[in-house]
Amino acid sequence: MKQIQFTYESPRQLEDILLRIGKFRGNKPVKLLFHIYSEQTDFEQLNVVCNTIVEHFPDAFCVGGSCNGSIVSGAFSGGSVTIACSVFESESTRIGILQYVLNEESAGPVAEDLIREVEKRPWVSAVGILLVSKGISLTHFCNGLSKLRRGVQVFGGVAGQVGEESPAYVFSNMCGFSDESVVFILYGGEDLHIETAKVSGWKPLGKPFTVTKADGNVLHELDGKPAFEAYSKYLNIQNDYYFFSNTLEFPLFYYDNGENLLRSPMACSENGALLLASDMENGSITRIAYGDPQSIMESVTVETSKLAKFCPEAIHLYSGVGRRTFWGDADINKENAPFNSLARTCGFFGSGEFVRARNVVHLHNVALVAVAMREGEADLSRVRTATVNDGTRAGKVSVISRLAHFTNVSSAELVEMYNKMTKNSITDALTGLYNRGEIQKRISDRFAEYPGEQMSLVMIDIDNFKSVNDTFGHAEGDNVIVGLSKRIQMASFENAPDADAGRWGGEEFMIMLPDMGIKEAVEFAEAVRTSFAEVEFPAVGRKTISLGATELRKDDTSDSICVRVDDALYQAKKTGKNKVVVL
């Protein structure tokens, strides 16, 4: 397998290159696949290019589309039209092209039809994708493609929109140009081997958000507020003409089907809803992400090392336009060039990247998908080592990394501080149980949320506790209180995991037992009483407790049930202590 890559300059130049390809081909039964990428808004020049290729090679396959920049020999080309010709030399290698209309209604059926077509062709081992999304959700499309038979590689990209007024487009020499279409390239043959890799390097930044309202690929609310506010509040990005370009480098990061995914908003409505490339489920946790140059290059090092062992003869890159925006045209080659040190590398920057991982097809934004190809067995004696330039740690991009690290550490410290403050506001400092205000609140909440449902209360008081403080001091009294709280926690863990226990005041405790009747409540109370009676305190010796228990009645309120359990405790104290009394 060989690959010829070049930037289109003129019809004369194209003719010369095609003549050289024809001379190399001769009478050999090779297959030719041309990928053509363009930043032009009109089709006239592309038609000339495609027609010229087909005139020279009527049996060649031509596919391509609009892009936000292309890659030739592992470098940003800067040219408006680039061409990569893959020459498959093995007689067993087979290529096929399918093209469909793609819209909201057809996305699912198109995936189903592709599966049928692949099943008709047992030789297919990989499917390449070039498509135009036009703002539709591609979730059903990806879910459908995931049903392709196991082992079939899937990869590709979403065409980039060249201008504000010009639609993105894809094409093939089979069906022509379309701004509402998907082109599938079918690869196969016993000598053709394909390996994929994915590079990200984007990290979550700042606080997590919960998706509180989403409708398919329209994200309405995060944390109960318009989704746009996450960008306006934390990044000062406005909902204006530049919204799309300003958010390209800051996609939403979330976890789905075992994969970390990035979603760049494609548009923002007047009410602050974000349009995404695929669905996001209600209840999902997401964060804004940023590009970390060091992580990017570490990922490039890992993935190129894997591909090096594959011994590729050609590599195709599908990269997100957000990566080009992040690095800038002067530095984007830092992440692309290492692939070219393994094999001739071409590709394009677009609006999304497809890759199949663990048999699930994912659509990414701001990822870099590398597709390595080879005909024949790998020659391990000729394994190349990728040259990765690690100079990214210096310069202005390192400032982004350090500021992001500062923000994340500061956020973590604030969250920890908030959690400590929240815990301190509802717990008793001595025992770690809930304080009186919190246990009262939880009893009241139980009445409000589950009116009339079964529950019981147990109230506890340490017998003759005043004498402990008077004789041995308050420190020993605290030891006794802590000892009882541990026995309550142990009994809750073993017998009532849903119990809420709190220090009512002084030496008194209150335990709420949801979904428990009086029989189970008494058993719980006896477990605490007998367990505590066995504790030997070094200075004080053994102590006992009195307990009151009651269960919910028909006309109870949170106040009435608390009064009744207090009366039950009083009866236990009055009638001899060290017992459980039920009212």
Image: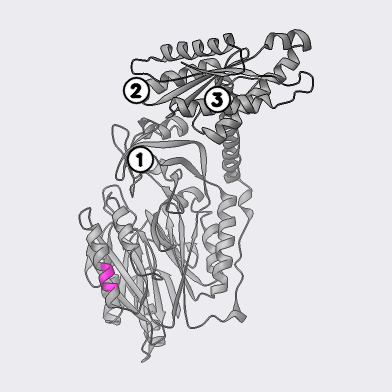
Q: Which residues are magenta?
A: 114-118
Q: Is residue 138 rendered to the left or right of residue 250? A: left
Q: Residue at x 74, y 25 (%)?
A: 536
Label ID, residue 525: 3
Where residue 460 appears, x then y in whole percent? Answer: 57, 18
Disc 2 marks which residue? 451
Residue that mark 1 sits on: 282
Q: Residue at x 52, y 40 (%)?
A: 205
Q: Secondary structure at mark 2?
A: loop
Residue 125: give its label: none
Q: Residue reaching furthest front? A: 575
Q: Amino acid at mark 3?
A: Ala
Q: Within the image, what quadrant is residue 448 found in?
A: top left
Q: Nearer the viewer, mark 1 or mark 3?
A: 3
Residue 40 visible in the shown view:
no
- Mark 1 crowdedness (10 Å alpha carbons): few <14, some 14-19, many ≥20: some
Q: CA distance from mark 2 to mark 3?
A: 24 Å
